[in-house]
Image: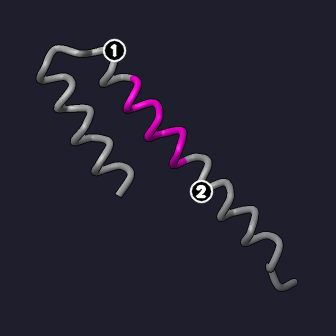
Amino acid sequence: MIGVGGSALMSTQFGRGNYTEGQNIFFQSVLLTLVISGFLVSVGFIWLDE
């Protein structure tokens, strides 16, 4: 959902000629994905059965 929504917003901004805003949306999408995946990996390691 983050990737699809971010790419739609980014392409809309690129179509309007706002390249810096589109790049900011791309960066925020990637950053949010990394934060969420890092959190989920951390939670997974906490409850990992040995």
- The outermost residue toward the bottom is 49
SS majority, magenta: helix
Tell me the kind of residue under disc 1: Thr
Picture coordinates of residue 30, whole percent (x, y): 47, 39
Q: In what element is the residue under mark 2?
A: helix
User: With respect to residue 42, does 25 lie above or below?
Assistant: above
Q: Residues within 10 Å of mark 1 (few under 14, many from 20)?
A: few
21 vs 39, nearest the viewer: 21
- The outermost residue toward the right is 50
- The outermost residue toward the left is 15
33 vs 45, nearest the viewer: 33
Which quadrant holds the N terminus? bottom left
Q: In what element is the residue under mark 1?
A: helix
The residue sitting at 53% across, 45% down in the picture is 32
Q: Residues within 10 Å of mark 2 (few under 14, many from 20)?
A: few
User: With respect to residue 44, does 7 lie above or below?
Assistant: above
The magenta segment is 24-33
| Residue annotated with mark 2 | 37
- Residue 14 among magenta residues: no
The residue sitting at 27% across, 15% down in the picture is 19
Which quadrant holds the C terminus? bottom right
| Residue annotated with mark 1 | 20
Tell me the kind of residue under disc 2: Ser
The residue sitting at 17% across, 31% down in the picture is 12
Picture coordinates of residue 6, whole percent (x, y): 32, 42
